[in-house]
């Protein structure tokens, strides 16, 4: 199973772009990279998923370099409501399935 | 469409007791997964049920068990409660098995049940 490493916490100001990087050095060929967001007292919420290069949706972008050993979640123009914990997950349907969230990155957006 | 619901939202038990938590998935979702979240260990996968069968299991002792009914509703049971079982228990549902097909299928989480063991 690919283990992920993320920064424990980050601070940003409203209106800035925030990039959260996740390291997954032993990612397997079939593994996908998925990001979830969790607000206090709520369950996590799916943000984005990708396999390689770049994926973009209405909420965020996910950048994955060619070696796939890391990935970067990009949140454009954050607001106070983006203050949350962000989890990076790596895995696939092959092999033993363990949905490992890790400890996540606590993002605090300041006014 | 209604989201994932969990009952009760809060629970206080004493050591040695047992507890049953309930989860109702989003209508049409057949997979239900359970997670334990604590400040020290983060979010940990307990098990996943699909079509009334446990399909995947995390690294938790046998005191943690679950089941799924024909309507996809699921219950989780913890027997002989320990102080360390105090946590937020989250339930998540998805249309298919969470890891079926390519990548992970999106899971929709409920608000959780806050269990306190005294």
Image (spheres, coloured by chain):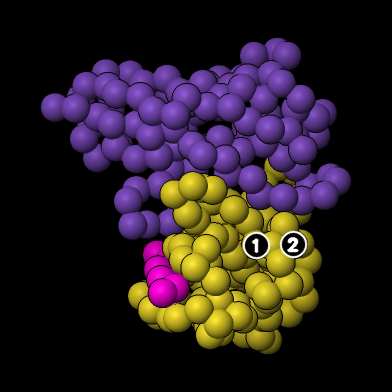
Quarter occupied by residue B7: bottom left
Report the predominant secondary structure element of the magenta stretch: strand
Q: Colour of chain A?
A: purple
Q: Is residue B91 left or right of residue A15?
A: right
Residue for badge 2: B57
Percent across and percent down for residue B62 are 73, 72
Q: Which residues are magenta?
A: B111-118
Percent across and percent down for residue B27 are 53, 75
In which chain is the residue bearing label 2? B
The residue positioned 73% from the left and 79% from the top of the image is: B52
Which quadrant does the C terminus of chain B fall into?
Answer: bottom left
Percent across and percent down for residue A84 are 34, 40
Is there CB contact under 8 Å for labels 1 and 2?
yes
Q: Is residue A53 above or below residue B35?
A: above
- Whether discs 1 and 2 lie on one chain: the answer is yes
The residue positioned 65% from the left and 62% from the top of the image is: B46
Q: Is residue B61 left or right of residue B38?
A: right
Q: Colour of chain B?
A: yellow
Q: Nearer the viewer, residue B116 or A26?
A: B116
The residue most toward the top is A66
Residue for badge 1: B46
Q: Is residue A3 left or right of residue A63?
A: right
Circle 2 crowding by C-alpha within 10 Å: few under 14, some 14–19, many from 20 = some
First in sequence: mark 1 or mark 2? 1
């Amino acid at each position: 199973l690919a283990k992920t490493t993320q920064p424990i916490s980050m601070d940003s100001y409203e209106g800035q772009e925030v990039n959260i990087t996740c390291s997954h050095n032993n990612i397997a060929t079939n593994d996908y990279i998925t990001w979830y967001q969790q607000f206090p007292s709520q369950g996590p919420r799916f943000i984005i998923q990708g396999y390689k290069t770049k994926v973009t949706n209405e909420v965020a972008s996910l950048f994955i370099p060619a070696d796939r050993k890391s990935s970067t979640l990009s949140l454009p123009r954050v607001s106070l409501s983006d203050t949350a914990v962000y989890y990076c997950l790596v895995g696939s349907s092959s092999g033993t399935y363990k949905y490992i969230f890790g400890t996540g990155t606590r993002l605090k957006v300041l006014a | 469409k209604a989201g994932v619901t969990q009952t009760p939202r809060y629970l206080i038990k004493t050591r040695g007791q047992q507890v049953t938590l309930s989860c109702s998935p989003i209508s049409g979702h057949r997979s239900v997964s359970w997670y334990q979240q604590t400040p020290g260990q983060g979010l940990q996968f307990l098990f996943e049920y699909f079509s009334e069968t446990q399909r995947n299991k995390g690294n938790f002792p046998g005191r943690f068990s679950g089941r799924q009914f024909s309507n996809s509703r699921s219950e989780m049971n913890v027997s002989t409660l320990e102080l360390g079982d105090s946590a937020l228990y989250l339930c998540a549902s998805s249309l298919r098995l969470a890891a079926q097909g390519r990548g992970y299928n999106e899971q929709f989480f409920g608000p959780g049940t806050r269990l306190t063991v005294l």
